[in-house]
Image: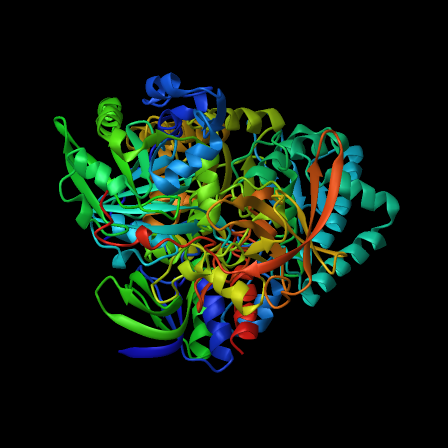
Amino acid sequence: MTSSDAIVIGGGHNGLVTAALLARSGRKVQVLEASDTLGGAARTEEFAPGFKVSTVAHLLNQMHPDVIKALKLESHGLSFGKGVSPTVTLSENTAPAILHGGYGDRLDGVSAGEAAAWKALRALLLRQTDILKRFLTSPPPKIGSLTRKDVISFGGAGLALARLGRDDMREFMRMILMNIADVADEHLSDDRLKGLLAFDGTVGHHLGPRSPTSLLGLYYRLAGETAGEAGAQVLPQGGMGAIAAALAKAAEAAGVSMRTGAPVGRIEIENGRATSVTLESGETLKADIVVSALNPKTTFTDLMDVRELDIGFVRKLRHMRMAGNVAKLHLALDRLPEIDTLTPELMAGRMVIAPGTDYVERAFNPAKYGAFSEHPAIELTLPSLSDPALAPDGACVLSAVVQYAPYHLREGWASGKVKFLERVLERLESTLPGLRKTVRHAELLTPVDIETRYRMPGGHWHHGELQADQMFVSRPIAGHAGYDTPVDGLYLCGAGTHPGGGVSGLPGLNAARHILTREA
Amino acid sequence: MGLMRPALLSVAERKAAQGHIHKIKFDTPFQPRLDALMQTHEWYDWAGYRAPHSLWSEELEYFAIRSQSALFDISPMVKYRIEGPDAEAFCNRLTLRDVTKLKPGRVHYTAWCDDSGHVLDDGTLFRLTETRFRLCCQERHLPWLLDGAFGFNVTICEETEEVSGLALQGPTTCALLKAAGFDGIETLKPFDIRDFAHQDGTVTVSRTGFTGDLGYELFIDTRRALSLWDRLWDAGGPYGLRAIGYAALNTARIEAGLIVANADFITAETALRADRARLPDEIGLDWMVDLKKGPFNGRRAIEAARRDGKARFVLVGLEIEGNVPADQAIVYHRKKREVGLVTAAIWSPTAKRNIALATLERPYGDSILNDLWVEIYALRELQYTRLMKRAKVVPKPFVKLARRTQTPPGDF
């Protein structure tokens, strides 16, 4: 029986970060990945002959600088490519509003008054995000048993709050659980910007812009940074698979042994302690500790004997909300779509079809009742524009995040998928006339497809809704925050743990740091 | 992986499965007989049922338990049927004791805890067959049991209404049952279960009870319940059979040192105050916690509490000077420092002692046993007399009767 110091289940980005960091501490680490490629939801895959795309996450906007530094990712091939990409609002009726740099530190296409209002709002949100940011890299405290570190962390946040000044502090406390629509209304008048905020606050969450707490989604986005710019994004050269490749290289350099095509069937527990894992093939691998980068629900209810866990724990786990609400569209196009109003540089960035708060709210309405949006909100990129290797000569790849597409579609995705694809293509066609004629191949991944393909329950990016009641001290579940589990020697390091999903590497980083203090 | 996943009931199904929520007060199937015997009109509410506190004389009902045969309607006791290939594994995960050691045809007294190791209830677990159990208890637990069934091939349903029960307790009960045609009843050992024919069906008899005396509990399909009462009643005359209410039973159970959920401790799910929930070690059930068996609910928390010395309370038996029952009295150390509360107290007619069950805050009752006092307020013709009486921690049970376990029991 092979034996290691640590087994990491799941070779997604968080699993790789944890594995690499554990290995750098001198441990013998084995990563076990079920599919044939590493990367999890950060992957570049061929979806039509000659056409490649980042199949789940398609933009990099949250990879944490601590992760990059700790793993020297830049020396392992991490590159921000052609730099920070702009965001463009797209609509058939209005000219685009353009956000340059880190979430619009410079605006084009809006009135001077609106630009000033945006500047003030953006500065306010970034100041507020700075308070929250410090919690990204600190493990959530255990309620009822605060450690010295927790107190220092809270104290630090308190001090930072105080440094905001009285008015700013009060404003923050007032705003923190607001909805993004009201915040936008308080500051802005341009529907294009309001629609963009509505989309960015809600994307990946089961929330509409007028749902309470939808501002948190925007904070979460703005807490991310790329190339030193808060709220900035890039389309990595080679797609998101290149990020996974850099992580894999860092892990390899640290001595991590990685196996793909090795789905884990069971985590073996003896006397309350995880001792080994058994692959679906029947092979057993021993380890001192086991770290799961998988969804918490998968980890506990699929991979182990549930009697090892307490009833209340399993009850909470099974009630963790994780029904995804986003579909992913990949189009293989004969040629680059024509958008008269945009330069190629702008088309190479992020384009968002969300013309106004009402539009996004109306898109959300049916999702509450198990139906998809008749007029979906769409974030699209044309990755082959900046990385021609992703498509055959002259052709083009379109990658789009489409919401809302509820996992629990009432009519079922078996019949609903074709209908939804039609809605999405209609919507794209009306904004990009002529597009449909150029579609050579279309692939729509519903939450059910994402669940099946990427082993993410509910097809949920975040491994569980990232809302106030499932965040921080309540992530993955209340009373069991953080990376420890009830089972000795078993840890979590995936997006289901604090701070949550997105290609940030933070759950992996936090988990590794925690494990290293626990298993010193 | 190979776990069977029974479909858990939906919210609507769960609601329908808990009909007691929608009814104000139930009658048990024995109500016609109880009504006919009722003289004191002292009824009380037992889990939503109208149940007799006493029927004709609290004291004489008690003496029926200790000297004759006493018949007590236990139909309101909450009962769950747990059945399936994983029933043993399910019960073993749910409860504190090792269920693999419980053979078919046997009962054991056990308890179960939440994730924090706090006791949700205590009760008796009947192993009726290899794969079928009956759990009897004070409080309702269907949602907890159903959630606990996730990952187990087991079905669980409440059978409180479908199954009626009678406790037959006292020294002449074995003889009475024999006379009533329960052939071979004398070979039943304590905690044995056996089925006997009754009409066109069966009655399940266990040698169990809540009195510390010789006695049996009889469980029967509710449709045949009344005829079982009549069968016992018809045979009972020569054996001094009397129907009794809870007051008499309560006296007997205190003598036997047995605790009652939500009287001697607050169950974890009903406690409103965070510090009221109790670990098994805090209510005298530490002996049930079987760390030699595998995982069970609350195990980690109980082990951690033991490691960290977090069991703050201890449940003890007290003997109090004088003859005034110390119900709900505060317990003091050196007459000054408040250290606990009496939860049940009687003048014991059999022990001829003034006894009580009390919860004390450690180290009192644990390592500090001397100089304990209880403060009794005796209301005498509209005036309280305050008594400060010396209390001594004594072992339980206060009354131990050889006939409880003697097999075969004495004949009459």
Which residue occupies the foreground of this view, B324 or B114?
A: B324
- Quadrant housing residue A202: top right
Which residue occupies the foreground of this view, A309 or A268?
A: A309
Which residue occupies the foreground of this view, A354 or B216?
A: B216
* Whether residue B187 is situated above or below residue A227 in the rendered picture: above
For the question of whether residue B349 can be seen, the reply is yes
* Whether residue A41 is situated above or below residue B6 in the rendered picture: below
- Quadrant housing residue A182: top right
- The residue positioned 44% from the left and 29% from the top of the image is A429
Q: Is residue A127 left or right of residue A44?
A: right
- The residue positioned 48% from the left and 21% from the top of the image is B40
Which residue occupies the foreground of this view, A41 or B70?
A: B70
Q: Is residue B296 left or right of residue B227?
A: right
* Whether residue B5 is situated above or below residue A491 in the rendered picture: above
User: At which x and y percent is residue A23?
Assistant: 47, 77
Where does the C terminus of chain B fall, quadrant-wise? Answer: top left
User: At which x and y percent is residue A417?
Assistant: 33, 32
Q: Is residue A61 left or right of residue A438?
A: right
Q: Is residue A80 left or right of residue A101?
A: left
For the question of whether residue A140 can be seen, the reply is no
